[in-house]
Image (cartoon, helix red, strand yellow):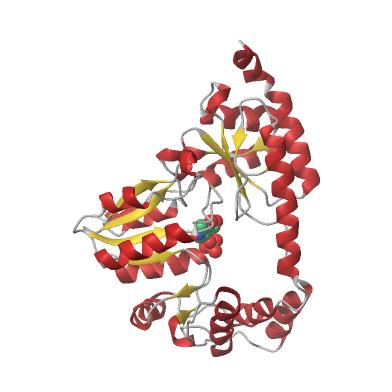
Amino acid sequence: MTRIASRVSQLHGEGALAVYSRAKELERQGRSIIHLELGEPDFHPAAPVVEALRTAVAAGRDRYCSTRGLPALVEAIADYLKRTRGVAATGEQVLVAPGCKMALSLAMMALVEPGDEVLLPDPSFPIYPSFTRGLGATPVAFGLEEKNKFQPDVDEIAQKVTPRTTMLIFNSPNNPTGTVFSDAAMEKLAVLARKHDLWVLSDEIYAVAPVEVIDAMDLLVLNTFTCAAEFTQVAAIEALRDSTSAVEAMVVEYRKRRDQFVSGLNHIPGFRCQAPDGAFYAWVNIEDTGLSADQVQRVLLEEAGVAGIAGAAFGPGGKNYLRFSLASARRVLEEALERIQRVSLHWRAAISR
Ligand SMILES: Cc1ncc(COP(=O)(O)O)c(C=O)c1O
């Protein structure tokens, strides 16, 4: 009998996409919806990047190319990391993937064996535990708790290391909390990883890794998608050059959105939100509303037309939280706050009792 491989049954989806589908359905019924569920920026690439892409396509840059990425892009990435982060990576430690999930899954396919244990944050990006299970390994969660300002408790992580633990995954700034891990926490994590000989998979968009890992991932690329599309890589070189300082302008705008939205959320009865250090998410504690996060998510979407995500989508630690994306313009965020304020009548009466 034909069958689907059992590893697929170990994978799960993303809560954000489920909320997005329902929000789209409401829009089809004529409802006005403010989309704060997906982390999809409203910015588009800067004009020189679009122009570089257009020129590359017109010039026929649609050929197979190196499985590791165009040499000029690989060098540009290594240079960018040196310039902006002080990371001394060489070109041979870089691999270009078509999207971050692909880079993550290549690294995990190269390094994780069935039966391994993989340490990862709760809450975190839902694909980490999903893909871990898909590879026949076991995700072991460590908490990022509000009482610790969502910083990792490295002593707790140390207690969770067993002889089967092979990898530690995190991303900083974290999705969904926006926490930038402190230098002290990073140093302790490095000591822990060295002590137990763990791989550290830090989700930072580009795949930079020791050469032997890049070699393994390279073979996986060859066996799966061959290479990232050439013209997108040409545009990526231009994006890293950032000749119009578009990144700085985006950071300034994101900061304004964060300050405006987080302050507004903290004025809504029952909501509590720490300002995130990075990323473009607001992670809001809704415990004081007396409702579950699922109920708040439903009231916001069905009655106010504001799509956010109940935090359990990012792990059990997200039970009393909602995540809102700040990837929309300030006037849109302002309207979202007004709408949320209006429907908060639902739980305000209960709070004041
Ligand atoms: C932390 C994190 N890692 C990876 C990804 C996936 O990135 P991509 O869409 O480039 O595959 C996302 C997307 O939301 C993310 O938030």
Q: Where's the C terminus, which quadrant?
A: top right
Q: Residue furthest front?
A: 184
Q: Name the residue located 68 percent from the left edge and 27 percent from the top edge.
A: 303
Q: Position of residue 158 (x, y in %)?
A: 29, 53
Q: Is residue 72 left or right of residue 30?
A: left
Q: Position of residue 208 (x, y in %)?
A: 46, 76
Identify which residue, 323 or 251, lies in the foreground: 251
Identify which residue, 223 or 80, lies in the foreground: 80
Seen in the picture, residue 97 relative to 179 is either above or below; the reply is below
Seen in the picture, residue 96 relative to 315 is either above or below; the reply is below
Q: Residue furthest left?
A: 163
Q: Where's the N terminus, which quadrant?
A: bottom left
Q: Position of residue 168 (x, y in %)?
A: 35, 60
Q: Residue furthest top?
A: 353
Seen in the picture, residue 349 relative to 68 is either above or below; the reply is above
Kindly indicate the quadrant of the structure image that contains residue 145. Answer: top left
Q: Name the residue located 46 percent from the left edge and 45 percent from the top edge.
A: 314
Identify which residue, 192 or 94, lies in the foreground: 192
Q: Position of residue 17 (x, y in %)?
A: 54, 47
Q: How many marks?
A: 0
Q: Name the residue located 76 percent from the left edge and 64 percent from the top edge.
A: 249
Seen in the picture, residue 251 relative to 70 is either above or below; the reply is above
Q: Is residue 4 left or right of residue 145?
A: left
Identify which residue, 138 or 34, lies in the foreground: 138
Kindly indicate the quadrant of the structure image that contains residue 54. Answer: bottom right
**Is residue 259 in sight in this rendering?**
yes
Q: Is residue 323 left or right of residue 235?
A: left
